[in-house]
Amino acid sequence: MKVQASFKPAWWLNNAHLQTIYPALFRKSIVLKDSWRERLTTPDNDFIDLDWCGKGDKPLVILLHGLTGSSESGYINGLQSKLLEQGFRSVVLNFRGCSGQSNNLARCYHSGDTEDIDFLYQTLSQREPDTAMAVIGFSLGGNVLLKWLGERGDKLSLFAAIAVSVPLVLSACATKLDSGFSRFYRGNLIRELKDYMQFKIDHLHSIGNVAEVDKINRLGDLSEIISFWQYDDQVVAKLHGFNSAKDYYQQSSSRYYLNSIEVPTLLIQAIDDPFMTAEVIPHKKELSQKITMEITQGGGHVGFVSGITPFQPRYWLEQRIPEFLQQQLFKTN
């Protein structure tokens, strides 16, 4: 189902770039109640860090952040606080190397890597077999989520899933970030990814893992990379077994998995998202019967800031996401 969403941008953040940049720069972090960190050892003898919020036997929501994000990202941190108020526990999967400590292997994370979310889901399902669970993903995390939902089909016991600002066609989004003001975002993200790789090299040296350092060194000089096409061809494809960036984009773009989704899913996309173009929005016939796609005219990339008073923002996602979760949870009871 494809519908228009109720979101109306704040008049004082009246374009896509202001919607995108304002919360990224000015949103203050919240000190969460009942929060703690857990580390899980992965099947390949690496680790992932989880940041929990809330205790007891309340319904549990898994959160997946975007590229170069973490549990400290404002949209994640703020949503965890709001979910706690609404009677949900939550846990953030920090993708490998994103928790403040580098992981112990050369492998990173990428838009099509569904191994860790599947491992986490299986772990939590075995630990809490009677708990109602949902998953929410933003940007890259939303792509990972939708791809995983499509891969697993009817084998998942989730009451809901929500994906926000998803780069549904990775090749189109990589190209979009090569043009106009979108190059500003590209520059920041590529710089952060290079820092991520250097952080990883330093960590691997510190633990004496020479073999994994060598894997990264064989990628060549990363200093001249300026685009996602280059980065994904030189780093992501080579580290994760793809033939090229094009092959990675083809296999990992979540748009090709939407028809196989069997979990009630809300997909929220802004037409003016500066990370993508209108062509990435799927047609109705591509959506499974379980997907509700809400399209907003404004909102930017993981922005969706409303509010009538300047510098007193209201984050619409923190209203819409719990609302959808409550609706779906009610249907299962």
Image (cartoon, grey):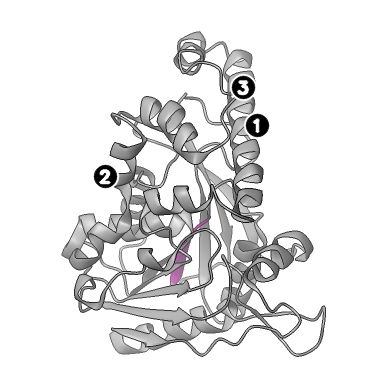
State the residue at coordinates (66%, 66%). 17
Q: Which quarter shows the C terminus?
A: bottom left
Query: Dot 2 corresponds to which residue?
Result: 251
| Residue 295 in the image, given as x and y percentages of width and height | 43, 80
Q: Position of residue 171 (x, y in %)?
A: 38, 48
Q: Which residue is at the far front? A: 180
Disc tally is 3
Whether residues under marks 2 and 3 lie with C-beta atoms below 8 angstroms apart, the answer is no
**Residue 258 image-quadrant placement:** bottom left
Q: CA distance from mark 2 to mark 1?
A: 26 Å
Q: Nearer the N terminus, badge 1 or badge 3?
A: 1
Residue 64 lies in the magenta stretch:
yes
- Residue denoted by label 3: 203
Task: Note whether residue 33 is visible.
Answer: no
Magenta part of the chain: 60-65
* Residue type marked 2: Gln
Amino acid at pointer 3: His
Q: Secondary structure at mark 1?
A: helix
